[in-house]
Each structure stands twice: as C-alpha cells, then as structure tokens.
Image: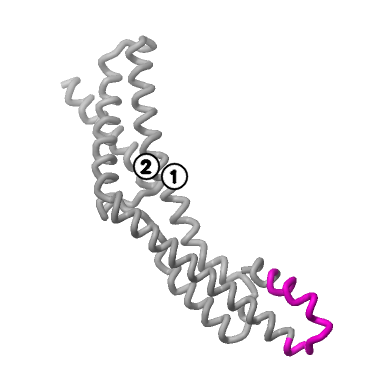
Amino acid sequence: MKNIIRHAEESIDSQKKNLSPEDCEKLKNNYIYKDICLCVDRYNLVKEFVNDIEDTFSIPLFWQFGASVFVICLGYLQFFFVELWSFNFFTIVSFVVTMSWEVFLYCYFGSILYNESASLITDIYVTDWLNLDIKCQKALVTIMENGKRPLIIRAGKIIDISLDTFATILKRAYSVMAVVNKFIEN
C-alpha cells in the first residue's frame, strides 16, 4: 500500500506546479484508486488460479499424500530390520528423505500462499489508509473483506496443504512406527 501511495505522489510531482493543492490531492487519490483496482483484479485472478489448482489437483494430491505417508511409515519400519550403516540402511534413509521432501515441497509452498494471503489485511490496515478519500477507503475495505478468508489449497478438499500438515504427517508416521515396534517386540 505504501508503494501505491508513493507511486501516486511520484506521478503527480511533475504536475504540482500547475495544480492547486485540492486538485493535487484529487489526482493523487485517482492514481491510488486505479492502483487499488488493479490490486483487486490481481487478487481475484490469484483466487481463481488457486481454485483452479485445487479443483484440478485436489484428488491426486490426496492420494499422493496418503501414499507418501504409507511409504514413509514403511520406510521407518524397515529401520528395525536392517543393519545400521549398511547399504540397505542408506537406501532406506535416502528413500524416506526423498518421499518426505516430495510432501514437504507441496506443504512449504502451500504455507507461503496461506501466509501471504493472511497478511493482506494487516498490511493494508497498518498503512495510512484513513487519510485517503472515501472511494479509496471503500476499495481497500473490499480488499480486506476478500482477505478475511486466506487462500489455502486442500488435498481431497479435506487436508490443508501446509507445514503444519507436514509436521503432522511426520508425527503420525513416527507414531505408527512406535506402535508397530511395540507389536513386534511382543
């Protein structure tokens, strides 16, 4: 938002000599309003893109997450049956790391999307938006209303793709490994 205001001020600097202060303020607000409208359009395009991505990849991501969790659990379990520092040990380690990395990338970028969209309202609110004209304030309120529900991609329309989900997957895989280990010991 600060960049939008700075852009508007820079745009009218060359015209300040020929305009009254009221006209300068009107011109500045018009520039700001146009930039805000562009931001609203871009935000709506991003929302549409996220919805398209979710509609297209929701089910495949769900199955991929399920299969990855299963494979990670099996990889953890195999640690009980191989000799430490053997070739098989390193094969299993590389396989588990690769499968974890595959899930991590989805979750990492899902978290970035969520965090950026969640910070939108705060970023607008901390600017000097109360000194703008009513038309600009209403446009900013529109953006803030749209930003109340942060963007997130869900696997199978159920599981949020985020780093919290990744941590949960690793915790669950370890829990399953511990349960199976107890079962094997008995």
For residue 22: magenta?
A: yes
- Residue 172, position as x, y percentages in the image: 29, 38
Specify the quadrant of the image occupied by residue 129. Answer: bottom right
**Residue 8 location, x and y as percent?**
69, 74
Colour convention: one colour
Give 138 or 34, whichever is nearer the viewer.
34
Q: Which residues are magenta?
A: 7-23
Quadrant that contains the C terminus: top left
Instruction: Categorize mark 2 by other alpha carbons within 10 Å: few (<14), some (14-19), many (20+).
Output: many
Image height check: is 26 above or below 85? below
Q: Is residue 86 left or right of residue 177?
A: right
Q: Which mark is residue 166?
A: 2
The kind of residue tagged 2 is: Phe
Residue at point 77% right, 87% down? 21
2 and 1 marks in contact (CB < 8 Å): yes
SS at circle 1: helix
Query: Left or right: 160 with respect to 181?
Result: right
Q: Which residue is mark 1?
A: 108
Label 1 is placed on what type of residue? Tyr
Where residue 100 sits in the image (x, y, percent)? 37, 33
Q: CA distance from mark 2 to mark 1?
A: 9 Å
Please report the residue visible at 79 percent of the width from the left and 89 percent of the height from the top.
20
Most distant residue in the right direction? 17
Q: Residues within 10 Å of mark 1 (few under 14, many from 20)?
A: some
The secondary structure that most of the magenta stretch takes on is helix
Q: Horizontal and vertical percent for residue 96?
A: 34, 27
Q: Residue at x 65, y 75 (%)?
A: 128
Looking at the image, residue 74 lies above or below residue 129: above
Element class at badge 2: helix
Q: Quadrant for the N terminus, please.
A: bottom right
Residue depicted at 36% across the width and 49% down the height:
161
